C-alpha cells in the first residue's frame, strides 16, 4: 500500500469534497472529509494536508496537483538537569521509537505497554490527526485514533501483562517498576525487529523511574538497554511517537477492562477510588475472593480497604 501527502488550500479542498461525495466515509478527528475510491482512501485535514493512501494513490493525487507550503512545529520546553539519557530536542522531529504504558495505577485490569516507530515525514500528519497524550483524550476518542494509527501501518508493538501473571511475579518479588521496565524493553525490541534497517535516530521511553534503576531491572533478567535510548517525563507531550504509543496502550487497557467486566458480569471501574473499593467487595460477594487474582492487582491497598464494604 502506497501513500502520498500533499498540501492544498482550503478552497481547493472544498472543490475536492463534492467530487468524492458519493464515496464519503466517516470523518476522522482533525479532518474535513474522508472518501474511498478504487484507487485510494483520501483524507483531507483542516491544516490543508491531504493523505492519499491505497493501491494507486498517485492516480487520485494526480487529479489535484501539488501545492506545498512550510509546516510549523511546536518547540518543546527545555528540561533541567540534562544527562546522557536526556534526548536532544532534534529527536522529536526525527525517526524514532516511543514507548508508554497504561493501567499501572488502576486496581482492576492489566498493565499494557505500547511502542511505536514514527518516520520524520509522518510526524506533522500525526499531529494534524489529533495524536496526543491519551490522558487528555476520552476513551471513545482514544479508540478512534488508535484505529487511525493502525490504518497508517505504523510499526508498533503491544505487550499486555494480564492480572494473573502480574500477581504471580509480584509474589516472586518483582516490583511494578521492574514489570514496566521489562514490558517496555520487550515492546521496543519487537518494534526494532519489525523496522529492520530503517533509519532510527533514537528511542524515547516515557520515564517512570531513574534510567539507572531501569537498567538495573533489565540486568536482573540478563537484558541490556538498546543504544540511543533516552528517558523523559511527560514524553508524550513532546514526542508524537510516545503519544501514539500512549494511545495504543490506553486503547488496549480500555478493551481489556471491557472484557473483564463482561466475563465477571460486573462493571469494573478504573482508578483506585472508593468506588473501586466497593466494587471489590461486590466481586468477592458474588464471585469469591479468588476471582480478584484474574482481574485485579491484589497487592494494592484497595483490597484491604474493601473489607469495610463486605
Image (cartoon, helix red, strand yellow):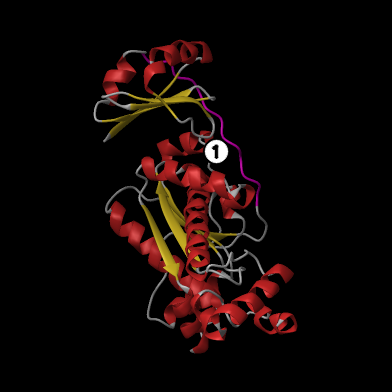
Task: Specify whether 219 is left or right of 214.
Answer: left
State the residue in front, 211 or 155.
155
Q: Is residue 273 visible in this depiction of the protein?
A: no
Which residues make up the magenta segment? 65-78
In reply to whether residue 76 is colored magenta, the answer given is yes
In reply to whether residue 194 is colored magenta, the answer given is no
The quadrant of the image that shows the N terminus is top left
**Can you identify the residue that label 1 sits on?**
130
Q: Residue farthest to the bottom?
A: 172
State the residue in front, 222 or 152.
152
Q: Secondary structure at mark 1?
A: loop
Position of residue 220 relative to residue 6, above or below, is: below
Q: Principal SS element in the magenta part?
A: loop
State the residue in front, 114 or 270.
270
Position of residue 238 relative to residue 115, above or below, is: above
Image location of residue 148, percent across then percent down? 43, 41
User: Which residue is rendered at x = 33% and y = 58% of the image?
Assistant: 192
Amino acid at each position: 500500500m502506497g501513500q502520498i501527502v500533499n498540501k492544498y488550500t482550503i478552497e481547493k479542498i472544498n472543490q475536492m469534497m463534492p467530487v468524492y461525495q458519493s464515496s464519503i466515509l466517516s470523518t476522522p478527528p482533525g479532518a474535513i472529509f474522508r472518501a474511498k475510491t478504487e484507487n485510494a482512501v483520501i483524507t483531507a485535514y483542516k491544516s490543508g494536508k491531504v493523505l492519499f493512501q491505497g493501491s494507486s494513490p498517485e492516480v487520485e493525487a494526480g487529479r489535484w496537483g501539488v501545492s506545498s507550503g512550510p509546516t510549523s512545529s511546536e518547540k518543546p520546553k527545555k528540561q533541567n538537569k540534562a544527562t546522557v539519557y536526556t534526548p536532544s530536542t532534534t529527536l522529536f522531529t526525527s525517526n524514532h521509537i516511543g514507548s508508554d504504558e497504561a493501567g499501572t495505577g488502576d486496581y482492576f485490569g492489566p498493565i499494557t505497554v505500547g511502542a511505536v516507530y514514527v518516520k520524520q515525514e509522518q510526524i506533522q500528519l500525526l499531529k494534524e490527526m489529533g495524536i496526543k497524550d491519551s490522558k487528555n483524550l476520552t476513551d471513545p476518542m482514544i479508540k478512534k485514533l488508535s484505529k487511525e494509527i493502525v490504518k497508517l501501518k505504523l510499526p508498533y508493538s503491544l505487550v499486555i501483562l494480564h492480572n494473573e501473571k502480574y500477581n504471580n511475579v509480584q509474589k516472586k518479588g518483582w516490583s511494578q517498576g521492574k514489570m514496566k521496565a521489562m514490558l517496555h524493553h520487550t515492546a521496543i525490541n519487537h518494534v526494532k525487529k519489525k523496522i529492520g534497517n530503517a533509519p532510527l535516530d533514537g528511542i524515547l521511553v516515557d520515564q517512570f523511574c531513574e534510567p539507572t534503576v531501569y537498567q538495573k531491572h533489565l540486568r536482573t533478567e540478563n537484558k541490556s538497554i538498546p543504544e540511543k535510548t533516552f528517558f523523559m517525563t511527560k514524553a508524550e507531550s513532546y514526542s508524537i511517537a510516545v503519544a501514539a504509543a500512549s494511545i495504543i496502550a490506553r486503547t488496549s487497557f480500555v478493551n481489556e477492562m471491557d472484557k473483564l467486566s463482561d466475563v465477571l458480569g460486573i462493571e469494573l471501574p478504573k482508578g483506585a477510588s472508593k468506588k473501586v473499593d466497593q466494587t471489590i467487595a461486590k466481586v468477592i460477594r458474588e464471585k469469591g475472593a479468588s476471582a480478584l487474582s484474574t482481574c485485579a492487582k491484589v497487592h494494592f491497598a484497595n483490597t484491604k480497604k474493601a473489607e469495610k464494604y463486605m
